[in-house]
Image: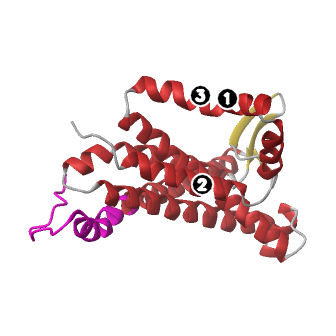
Amino acid sequence: MTDLRTDAPVASRRSGYAAQWPTVTRLLVAEGLRTLLITTAAMLAIGVVGSLVARWRGWQLLTTSDLDAMSFEVVADSDGVTIVASLLFVPGGVGVAALVMAFVLAARTRALIAAGATRASVAVGNLVTALVMTAYVLVVAGIVLAVVAGGVGRAAELLGAEGPADLAVLAVRGLGAVLMALVGAITITTVFLRWPWWVGALVLPALAILLPWLAGWALPGLADAVGQAVGRPGFDLATAVVTAAVYWVIVRRVPVP
């Protein structure tokens, strides 16, 4: 693995971080984007090859713009073979790939630190990578949606947006949902790097299940307020920011054997 330490003497941990974080960030962003580009190409290739095979074999090819249908499947029955396809399976696959890469890149935290990177530079690299991958997923989703709908205006209608304000709300929701998933992935991974496995196995379910139940029982007013906040457009984005802060605190204490 590349040695991230510089030859020049480092006056302080802060100067080491300032020198390293651009390099670490470039390494992580490059790997994340490379994987997403390969995934995009593979998903598009599946669609093209499937369409060509359907034409060659005389199969029926049905396309759908249903937002809930993110699949490319072959159905065989007594009437023949039908391929039911939606280009929306492309952003779906890219989103899954981004989530997987968030786990994978965060799992390399110890290796990067052992190679000379500071914990702060690794933290910045993973957070910036999460932002870049989020942007990539949203751009792919927007392009595919515009192609499926036959234009930007019709894409907005397909999403149920009645104007620029509705589109802005949907954009904030999408940004928050994807970013929260990726930042949550790197935070969960880092929890298992920071402490023994049983800590994460106990704490994470407790936070997801037990804590909301206790809050609803002991503080019903607070639980109701949180329930109302969940439905607001910026809730996921705000949660992603808070989760990023938690990640920053945890990763700064990750031990290296």
Left or right of 230: which side holds 113?
left
Query: Magenta span covers which residues?
Result: 1-29
Question: Between 130 and 239, which is closer to the camera in this rendering?
Answer: 239
Q: Residues within 10 Å of mark 3 (few under 14, many from 20)?
A: few
Q: Are marks 1 and 3 in contact (CB under 8 Å)?
A: yes
Q: Are marks 2 and 1 in contact (CB under 8 Å)?
A: no
Q: Amino acid at mark 3?
A: Pro
In space, the residues marked 1 and 3 are separated at their CA atoms by: 6 Å
Q: Which mark is residue 166?
A: none
Q: Position of residue 113 (x, y in %)?
A: 24, 50
Q: Residue at x 54, y 46 (%)?
A: 184
Q: Amino acid at mark 1?
A: Ile
Q: Is residue 4 magenta?
A: yes
Q: Residues within 10 Å of mark 2 (few under 14, many from 20)?
A: many
Q: Amino acid at mark 2?
A: Ala
Q: Residue at x 35, y 50 (%)?
A: 252
Left or right of 4: which side holds 179?
right
Q: Position of residue 182 (x, y in %)?
A: 54, 50
Of callouts 2 and 1, the N-terminal one: 1
Residue labelled with disc 3: 205
Residue labelled with disc 2: 240
Q: Quadrant of residue 192?
A: top left
Q: Residues within 10 Å of mark 1 (few under 14, many from 20)?
A: few
Q: Which mark is residue 209?
A: 1
Q: Position of residue 229 (x, y in %)?
A: 79, 52
